[in-house]
Image: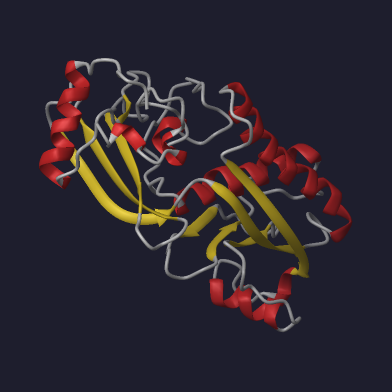
């Protein structure tokens, strides 16, 4: 911790006061995103602020406190307080890749693995740009290819586990269980079921683009981005409303290919001690 930290702005003081009143939480400098370009398609926006605080005795689990306020910080609009997986470290992922002759076949393994590697490349590039010696997040994935009809409901955790168990494949020891089901006749997006007490966390990605033919390398990259950047982020507390830093009307956010402003996941140094908050023993200057 440096001997002195930059003085807080009036806006930061307002947010700090909200944390103190609402959560009895002392925080020197909270993570705040307040870009006026971040609005939904109705032109509505807000200030978003988050705190990730490690839960004592629960490795890999954080208490995430979130507030939405007016742009000037004066009016508290919404808040939440819940436990989620900490968005840092090495995550082991078991992927059930369901095959369909028209779209996904086991011969595509190399294309899919290259797409998975590109997600790790995204996190490595982000870390390198901030002078970090290693990525904050890394995924280690194990892929199991199964015939599509072998899984009764690819969006059901129990159904996917049953199909894997029938082939002698255990799911214990993994952080995430992912179902990838690009069934050509079914249009479905992704889904995630955050639950820190029920490992592995489950997520599924369907045929969101209604692919009808064999997936290309670019298609697999899109699927991987949906799975690892989008659906996994829900297990870290990114809301189903997708409105931490929403964008609409053609504005391309600078944090791409990440799913939201990195500071809101604790991936930036906001308190000035040169350590990203999610890795900091005194995050958000809480020792001050």
Image-quadrant location for residue 3: top left
The answer to whether residue 132 is seen in the rendering is yes
The answer to whether residue 261 is seen in the rendering is no
Q: Residue at x 20, y 38 (%)?
A: 26
Nearer to us in this view, 180 or 121: 121
Where is residue 31 drawn, in percent x and y?
A: 33, 30
Q: Quadrant of the C terminus?
A: top left
Considering every residue shown, the one lying at the far right of the view is 107
Considering every residue shown, the one lying at the far front of the view is 3
Where is residue 136 drawn, in percent x and y?
A: 56, 39
Horizontally, is 168 left or right of 76 in the view?
Answer: right
Where is residue 123 drawn, in percent x and y?
A: 62, 35
Q: Residue at x 47, y 20 (%)?
A: 251
Nearer to us in this view, 47 or 24: 24
Q: Quadrant of the N terminus?
A: top left
Q: Residue at x 35, y 56 (%)?
A: 55
Q: Is residue 188 above or below residue 243?
A: below
Where is residue 29 drawn, in percent x and y?
A: 28, 28
Image-quadrant location for residue 36: top left
């Amino acid at each position: 911790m440096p001997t002195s930290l930059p003085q807080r702005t009036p806006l930061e003081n307002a947010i700090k006061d909200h944390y103190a009143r609402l959560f009895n939480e002392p925080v020197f400098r909270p993570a705040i995103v307040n870009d006026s370009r971040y609005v939904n398609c109705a032109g509505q926006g807000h200030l978003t602020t988050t705190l990730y605080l490690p839960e004592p005795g629960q490795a890999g689990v954080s208490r995430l406190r979130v507030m939405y306020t007016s742009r000037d910080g004066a009016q508290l609009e919404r808040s939440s307080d819940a436990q989620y997986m900490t968005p840092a470290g090495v995550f082991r992922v078991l992927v059930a890749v369901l095959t369909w002759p028209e779209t996904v076949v086991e011969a595509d393994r190399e294309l899919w693995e290259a797409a998975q590697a590109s997600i790790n490349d995204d996190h490595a590039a982000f870390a390198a740009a901030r002078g970090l010696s290693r990525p904050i997040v890394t995924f280690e994935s194990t892929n199991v290819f199964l015939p599509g009809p072998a899984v009764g409901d690819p969006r059901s955790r129990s159904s996917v586990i049953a199909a894997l168990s029938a082939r002698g494949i255990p799911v214990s020891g993994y952080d995430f269980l992912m179902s990838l089901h690009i069934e050509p006749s079914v249009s479905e997006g992704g889904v995630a079921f955050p639950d820190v007490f029920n490992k592995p966390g489950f997520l599924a990605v369907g045929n969101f683009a209604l692919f009808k033919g064999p997936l290309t390398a670019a298609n697999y990259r899109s699927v991987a981005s949906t799975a690892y950047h989008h659906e996994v982020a829900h297990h870290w507390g990114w809301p189903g409303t997708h409105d931490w830093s929403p964008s609409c009307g053609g504005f391309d956010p600078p944090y791409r290919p990440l799913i939201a402003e990195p500071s809101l996941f604790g991936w930036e140094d906001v308190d000035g001690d040169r350590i990203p908050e999610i890795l900091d023993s005194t995050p958000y200057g809480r020792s001050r």
